[in-house]
Image (cartoon, grey):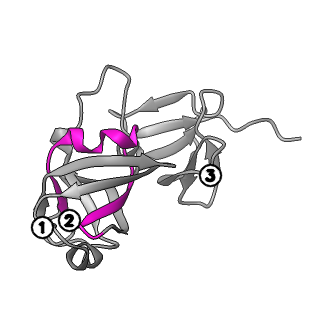
Amino acid sequence: MTSALVTEDHICVGVITGSRGTKGEVTVKSFTGKPENLAAYGPVMDDLGHVFNIKVVSQKKGVLVVRLSGIKDRNTSDILKGKRLFILKSMLPKKEKNEFFFFDLLGLSAETVTGEKLGVIKNILNFGAGDILELSNGMMVSFAMETVPEVDLKRKRVVVKPPLEI
């Protein structure tokens, strides 16, 4: 559950997965494009509205070890396990033309080339073989140019071209 301080102007960029060492360092699963760039977005805020400056200490297998300002011992860092970390969306880099963030796709209508409504994008998944759009009707669509040739943010829709049935 998010607090009243976390609004639609915020985006979750990671989650604290545990403590490391005795000096208050925490492990973080980063949701950013390049996990090691988590600190580049500036201060982060947890679910309760606590604001932390963040410094990446190391990275191993996609998990970051970070120092959060004000966290000096393991007892305090243990309390933070499971807390999500947010930044203001305005801190994200500016998008180029025809670029978008995944959160821009959530809630968009998915339609066929002929305009038939398939559902609404409710999630974007990745199990290692590429991104998949999960639609409200239960359909899963590979997020590739062959199957999603058009993303139209202005009209709040994506065009889905399902592969031929065998």
Towards the viewer: 52 or 103: 52
In terms of sequence position, does the residue under pointer 3 or pointer 1 come before the other?
1
Q: Is residue 85 above or below residue 121?
A: below
Find numbered disc 1 in the image and state the secondary structure of the residue it sits on.
Answer: loop
Residue 13 visible in the current orientation: no
Residue plotted at (24% across, 31% down): 93
Q: Where are the magenta residues, as a range?
A: 22-45
Q: Alpha-carbon neighbours of circle 1 within 10 Å: few (<14), some, or many (≥20)?
A: some
Question: Residue 18, how many percent across, how many down?
Answer: 37, 69
Q: Which residue is outermost to the front? A: 22
Q: Quadrant of the C terminus?
A: top right
Q: List the residue tagged with mark 1.
A: 49
Residue 103 visible in the current orientation: yes
Q: List the residue tagged with mark 3.
A: 127
Side (left or right) of 141 relative to 105: right
Q: Alpha-carbon neighbours of circle 2 within 10 Å: few (<14), some, or many (≥20)?
A: many
Q: Quadrant of the N terminus?
A: bottom left
Q: Amino acid at mark 1?
A: Gly
Residue 46's tag is 2
Q: Amino acid at mark 2?
A: Asp
